[in-house]
Amino acid sequence: MNQDELKRAAARSAIAYVGTGQVVGVGSGSTVNFFIEQLAAIRERIAGAVSSSQRSSELLAASAIPVLDLNEVIAAGTPLPLYVDGADEINDKLQMIKGGGGALTREKIVAEACERFVCIVDGSKLVDTLGRFPLPVEVIPMARSQVAARLREIGASPVQRPGFVTDNGNLILDAAGLTIVDAPALEAEINQWPGVVTVGLFARRGADIALIARPEGIETRFAH
Ligand code: 5RP
C-alpha cells in the first residue's frame, strides 16, 4: 500500500465515529481530504460540518455538505461530539505537531470546541519524540523577526514558510531542530510570546483517539 492508500484507509476508519444527525468538526490536509470524500457518501446522515480551513470548507461545499459557522453552532448550543484531523507527527501520548498545511490556528479552535479528537494518520507519523518535523508557528507579520529570535534562543532554526500566508493573513515560521521532551510546557511557553498566534503543538489538548493505518491494518490507540 502506498501512503495515499494508507491515508485513505485511516480516513475511512474514522467514519465509524460519526453519529447520525451530528455536526462534525473537520480538520485539514490530504488525509482529511480523504475523510471528506467518505463523509460525502453519508452526507444525508449528518447535520453539517464545522471546518478548520478555507480549503476544507471548499471541499465540503463541493461535496454538498453544509459548512456551519462555529460561532452560530456554539450560540445555538449544538453539541460537537467529534473532531477528525490529521497530524504531521504524533507520539504515544497522542500529542501532536500540526500545521504542515498552515491551518493550525483554526484547527486548534475547532479541536477545542469538540468533545472528542480523532486523529487519522498513516504509520509514518508516529514518533517517539516530537520535533523531527519542523514546528510550525503562526505569527503576526510584524512579530516575525522577534519570534524567530526567541525560537533561536530555545535552540530552534526557524525559517519563514516561503510565499505562504495563512487563512488569517499571518505568516508561518517553521522551527526545525527541536527535541520536544515536555510538549505541554513548550506549547504554553511559545503561545505566550507576543505576536504568536498559535504554535503547532497540540499537547495540552491532544487527540483522544488515534487511528493509525499500516499495511497490515488500522491500529486504534487511546490517550492515557
Ligand atoms: C494542516 C495539518 C495537517 O493535519 C497535517 O499537516 C497533516 O497533513 P496530511 O494529512 O496532508 O499529511 O496540520 O495544518
Image (cartoon, rainbow, N blue to C red):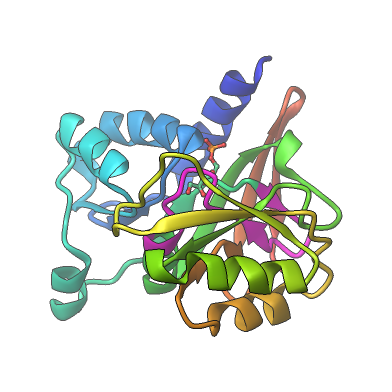
- Relative to 56, does residue 140 appear above or below in the rendering? below
- State yes or no: residue 91 in magenta: yes
Residue drawn 61% across and 77% down?
190
* Residue pictured at 61% horizontal, 57% vertical: 209
**25 on left or right of 119:** left
Residues drawn in magenta: 89-106
Quadrant of the image for the N terminus? Answer: top right
Q: Percent from the top left, x then y, of residue 133? A: 71, 47
Residue 206's x, y, as percent? Answer: 61, 67
- 15 displayed left or right of 193: left
Q: Position of residue 112 (x, y in %)?
A: 43, 72
Q: Is residue 100 magenta?
A: yes
Query: Viewed as shown, does residue 174 lie left or right of 143?
Result: right
Can see residue 206? no
Q: Considering depth in this image, is 30 or 13 the residue closer to the camera?
A: 30
In the depicted structure, whether residue 37 falls above or below residue 153: above
Q: Quadrant of residue 7?
A: top right
What percent of the width, then of the height, locates residue 71? 18, 72
- As drawn, which residue projects farthest toward the top? 1
Taking depth in this image into account, of 138 and 15 the one nearest to the observer is 138
For the residue pair 208 and 187, the one nearer the viewer reads as 187
Give me the residue at 13% from left, 71% from top.
72
Q: How many marks?
A: 0
Quadrant location of the C terminus? bottom right
Query: In which quadrant of the rendered view does residue 136 lie?
Result: bottom right
Visible residue check, residue 37: yes
Quick one: 152 or 6, which is closer to the camera?
Answer: 152
The rendered magenta stretch, by its main secondary structure, is classed as: loop
